[in-house]
Amino acid sequence: MEDNILEIRGLSKSYGDFRLSEVNISLTRGYIMGFIGANGAGKTTTIKLIMNMVKKDSGEIKVFGRDHVKDELYIKNKVGYVSEQPVFYENETVAWNVNFAKKFYDRWDHALFEELLIKFKIDKFKKINQLSKGMKMKTALAIALSHHPELLILDEPTSGLDPIVRDELLGILMEFIQDENKSVFFSSHITSDIEKIGDYVTFIDKGKIILSEEKDTILEEWKIVKGDAIQVDNYKQDLIGIEQTKSYFKALVKDFHAFKAKYDISSLVIEKPSLDDILLHLTKKGN
Amino acid sequence: MIHLVMKDFYVNRKYLLIAVLYLGFALFLTDNLAPTLIFALAISYGTVTRSCYNDDKDRGGIFLRALPIRASTVVLSKYLLGLTMILMNVLAFVLHSVIRGQGLETDYGNIMVIIFTLSLVYSVYLPVFFKCGYMKATSFQTIFFIGILVISFGFRALVDFMKSSNPAGGQWLAQRVLNLAEMLPKDSTTLLILLCSVALVILTISAAISLKIYNDSSV
Amino acid sequence: MFISISNQDPRPLYEQIYDSIKTEILKGKLMPGDALPSIRQLAQDLKISVITIKRAYLELEQDKLIITRPGKGCFVADRDIKEITSLNLHEIERQIREVVSKAKKTGVLRQNVEQIFNKVLEEEY
């Protein structure tokens, strides 16, 4: 077995205004990594680069230990990919689209696909353009799962879905991970989903990775600190992304143990951060 | 690759069905082949461009790129589609001759036009499609056809010029062209084979260019 | 096995799981030799990260509350009554210390604490 199921080193890509620079991401087998960032931060670009749908300027991407361009076919056979707003031949039925796609996979399991269709309540004789957004996503996921992939790469799989479908989807991902050889890499700007099931979280902003860490560690060591606006200067040095009004300030603290040892926190309100808070404060201007 | 070509036929089935039926009627019910020929060329060209449209619309390029298909397979499938169209048309005209009991020679001219025109047109359209996508390729195609029309008229003028009694220019050019024509094989079959070879070369070069473009492209 | 976890709880998730399982063991709801759910299964049931569960299980193992049999899973460790009682007492002492310490910090007088303590003892025992 190779070291990491996904290994990205020094990935860079420029497009007009936008630049992805020196992106490094590592994911081991058996875990779920959430990829968080604002719209336009570079999530979709990174994912498309992994799938060789966009040509990189520089850097290295290895999936299952193999180069993502040289071994593209091998990799695509073992990766289940779902794009942001899944794509099909819209005028044809689900059944036709699947019959077409399945011919290209080495390990297509049609029995599994039929099972998933029933489970997801998808009518395979419906035309793609008659399906709702949630249905399309589930169809794409069913196809992605039916060729027995080892890695699922999903771009914003839950956006635009109602909470019930979202929950179903998260359940499916957790089921997938029961096999500790498999991993999931998914991007989302709905951070609560990643907060639920993510093992690792990677934050990206304006084309740069700003944090990549075990989710638990992040949520334990980082804290939201609130206090009287007058005091803000006492702590300013160690505060990240300060939000300030006339009467109070709110900021993020990175290593709370160290912070607690250094300062008197009795007049401060300390809270557990959400991943949203972390993204917000880390990306605040002036950081 | 065959799957991709089959897919192209299937997705375009309504269009093809109507076109083929019409062609069938035209071929066997009329004697005037010129409009039929033009029609056959039009639908052959249309089939390939429509298949490109189907793959390109609604970000369809992503669907194909997510599948484990080699880039060369995707590109070559379009050329295979083109070759299939050429073959189908040639067969239709050959069948026409056979059924009518006329010699193949009557249709040789038509067959040569089919092979040459379609090869040329596919060779130009496909790299443009792979580079710019369907929308831009369509605009290009319009300009291209207008250009062909202009050239056709220009050619006509050239021929008139050559026929003219102006010795210095016209005769000299006409002689050159006649010399060239002397070099061509008189035998129709050889001419046909020569034409096919040229067509194949043009298509191959076009395919190589398309492949390079597609390999470097993003969806 | 009942595992109570809550986002409202200030303790880290892995600690909540650790505490839940430990409580079940100390109460005797989980007996020595009982199998614990697999790490991944529990993660899926609770819909939380595998790493969180792993950490909780690791700590439980370090505290000799559970043992891992390779290839078989995690099981409640054998322990004798004395050890369980002593663990229980440790836990009680820890909690009382927390309360007393809090009382002291907020300026409650010792005699008031004693009063409350005795009152509770009267009611419970």
Image (spheres, helix red, strand yellow):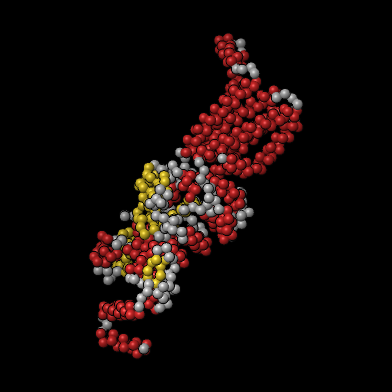
Question: Which residue is situated farthest in the bottom direction here?
Answer: C122
Quarter that holds the C terminus of chain C: bottom left
In this image, A284 relative to A50: left or right? left
Quarter that holds the N terminus of chain C: bottom left
In this image, C17 relative to B6: left or right? left
Rendered position, A133 above or below C119: above
Which residue is painted at 51% across and 35% down in the image?
B210
Residue C43 x %, y %: 44, 65
Which residue is painted at 35% across and 68% down in the image?
C61
Which residue is painted at 66% across and 40% down in the image?
B16
Which residue is painted at 44% across and 43% down in the image?
A69
Residue A282 x %, y %: 34, 57
A143 or B9: nearer the viewer: A143
C45 or A132: nearer the viewer: C45
Residue A260 x %, y %: 26, 67
Question: Which residue is situated farthest in the top direction here?
Answer: B167
Quarter of the view holding residue A218: bottom left
Residue C77 x %, y %: 37, 72
Q: Is residue B123 visible?
A: yes
Q: How many marks?
A: 0
Q: Is residue B139 visible?
A: no
Quarter of the view holding residue B102: top right
